[in-house]
Amino acid sequence: MSSPRNPSAAPRTPTVQHAEQATPHSPPPMPDWYQQGLPHIWLPYSQMKTAPAPLAARSTQNARIQLTDGRELVDGVAAWWTACHGYNHPHIRAAVQAQLETMPHVMFGGMVHEPALRLASRLSALLPGDLERVFFTDSGSVAVEVAMKMAIQYRLNTGEPKRTKMLAFKGGYHGDTLATMAVCDPEEGMHHLYGDVLATHIIAPLPQDEESEAAFFKLLDEHAHELTAILTEPLVQGAGGMLFHAPAVLRTLRAAADRYGLLLILDEIFTGFGRTGTMFACEQAGIVPDIITLSKALTGGTMALAATVARPHVFEAFLSDTPDHALMHGPTFMANALACASANAALDLFETEPRLEQVAAINRHLTEALEPCRMLPGVKDVRVLGAIGVVELEKIANPDALRQRFIAENVWIRPFRSIVYVTPAFTIPPEDLRILTDAIYRVLST
């Protein structure tokens, strides 16, 4: 996939499908649905008073997004890290269509169905160790919230009612709900405005060297009596700034959890399903968490679905003749049949198509193609892991403006905080991957 890097080569641009002819001075009119609907929508992570107007997507295919104005963008972020098999994969599409004809949804309270049970069985077989009890939800934030509820109720059910706090880490991000905001980085994250109304947990630096490891164990000596679990993103803290850490850190956390009688929760919503080069990031450390959370690429970016998976000793703490010992949680669309069918099809593709080999090829290209950015003014670091490529800048004064410059290059890359990153589909064609990395170099060098 990699080829000799020549930053001065002529720009490679995608083929534009001109659905509507326009000139730079007379853009085509937006469709009626856009003009009528935009005044009524509230967009995520956007200051609606000043943010540029959102793009109008018309269709997708593999690693490209077609816009209603005729432009075509190479997607560098795979729909917020979800579309690992590319957009509109025919196998996933066929599975969803077949399920739609028989049963799109049925309540999961007191009733089960084949797509969910097949998926639970397959996830149990695929995950490391004895992670075998699957609780389905429909978003990553809720999957983490369920993991937190499991860890807290685990203590309540086993007679340790004072051990209800989490130990999470600076640079971490685990979701936007009120519970998960409380375990995100309280200072560098996006949720600092809510500080006074969030539950109080313990947030510490990751133990990455001798000094921070000593401080970490000192903190555990002081607070283990009130802690129920350690919670972290393995290998990559994603929305916190694409911060990487070594597998040895996870081994330290596993040893600490065992030493102090804590549960270890790994949030693999971003890292799961091949993104870091192995199916699950924790495999690179050779450890098994007590609870793991999954979402993002679970359905190949097709449907909303998430899972919280626990080991037997966690599940068994909820088995009792006492009704209050049950896990009282149940989203309305839990284990949605369409989403489970999509996820089963996505898992098929990991078995039948060379996804991890494709990730390795992407890794080789990103490593070579992004390295020249290290010498550009204002660049602080360049790092690559699996199919994640990051260029960290000293600062980004105006992320919206920088995003518009990437759009002008016909790529969809969303800088945030101080980083420009790509997390492409594993199926991205080599020429599209080159378009992404060439665009990063050009934009950051001018």
Image: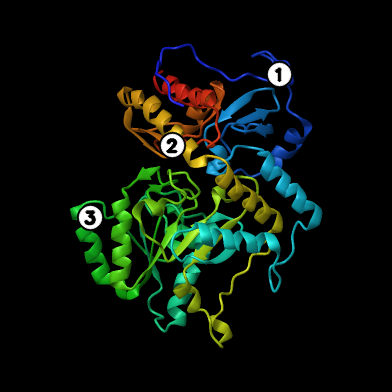
Q: CA distance from mark 1 to mark 2?
A: 35 Å
Q: Residue most toward the right?
A: 101
Outermost residue on the bottom side: it is 321
Read off the residue under disc 1. Answer: 18
Asked if residue 270 lies left or right of residue 33, the reply is left
Q: Residue at x 36, y 44 (%)?
A: 243
Q: Are marks 1 and 3 in contact (CB under 8 Å)?
A: no
- In the picture, the disc for residue 360 is 2
The quadrant where residue 87 appears = top right
The kind of residue tagged 3 is Ser
**Which quadrant does the C terminus fall into?**
top left
Q: Is residue 55 visible?
A: yes
Labels 1 and 2 touching (C-beta < 8 A): no
Say what secondary structure mark 1 lies in: loop
The type of residue carrying mark 1 is His
Horizontal side of residue 101 vs 11, given as left or right: right
Q: How far is disc 3 from disc 2 in space, using C-alphas? A: 32 Å
Q: Nearer the viewer, mark 3 or mark 2?
A: 2
Determine whether the residue tagged by mark 3 lies in a helix, strand or loop.
Answer: helix
Residue 70 position within the rendered picture, expressed as x and y whole percent measured from the top left: 69, 22
Q: Which residue is more in the foreground, 81 or 149?
A: 81
What secondary structure is found at the residue carrying circle 2?
helix
Give me the disc on residue 212. Answer: 3
| Mark in the foreground, 1 or 2 | 2
Task: Tell me the residue at 29%/65% (across/down).
Answer: 256
For marks 1 and 2 on the same chain, the one whose residue lies earlier in the sequence: 1
Q: Position of residue 181 (x, y in %)?
A: 47, 57
Mark 3 neighbour class, 10 Å CA radius: few under 14, some 14 to 19, many 20 or more: some
